[in-house]
Amino acid sequence: MTINSINGCIGCEECVKSCPCDVIRLDKETGKAVILYPADCQICHLCRMYCPVDAIEIRPEKSIPVVVSWG
Ligand code: SF4
Ligand code: SF4
């Protein structure tokens, strides 16, 4: 699971300020939030909860391979 996409951003920067892992940045040219380091996302959902326009989507699929060991 990871942060998946940002659509309909109004550039309030709340997600940037709320993310403890520095995953999201505000693009200076577009004035909108971009997902810069998706692999660092810890699925805390803070960005999604703080976004006033519900622009952030977090999906259940893994976007990066995860190594699991047994034994
Ligand atoms: S879910 Fe949490 S860690 Fe992931 S981008 Fe949002 S605030 Fe950052
Ligand atoms: S909180 Fe939502 S509207 Fe505000 S910058 Fe982030 S994605 Fe855009």
Image (cartoon, helix red, strand yellow):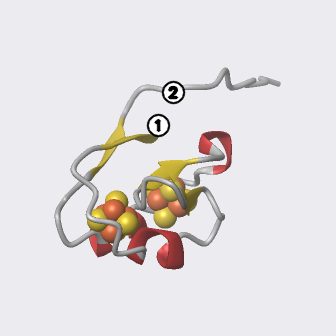
When the figure is inspected, residue 59 is found, relative to residue 25, above or below; the finding is: above
Query: With respect to residue 45, does 39 lie above or below?
Result: above
Q: Tag 2's secondary structure?
A: loop
Mark count: 2
- What residue is rendered at 54% in x and 61% in y? 28
* Callout 2 touching callout 1 (CB < 8 Å): yes
Q: Amino acid at mark 2?
A: Lys
Disc 1 marks a residue whose amino acid type is Met
Residue 42 figure quarter: bottom right
Residue 20 x/y as whole percent:
61, 72
- Per the rendering, the mark at residue 1 is 1
Relative height, residue 24 to residue 65 (above, below) = below
- The answer to whether one can see residue 48 in this image is no
Tag of residue 62 = 2
Left or right, 71 with reference to 18: right
What residue is shown at x 55% (from left), y 58% (from top)?
A: 24
Residue 14 position within the rendered picture, expressed as x and y whole percent measured from the top left? 39, 77
| Furthest-front residue in this view | 29
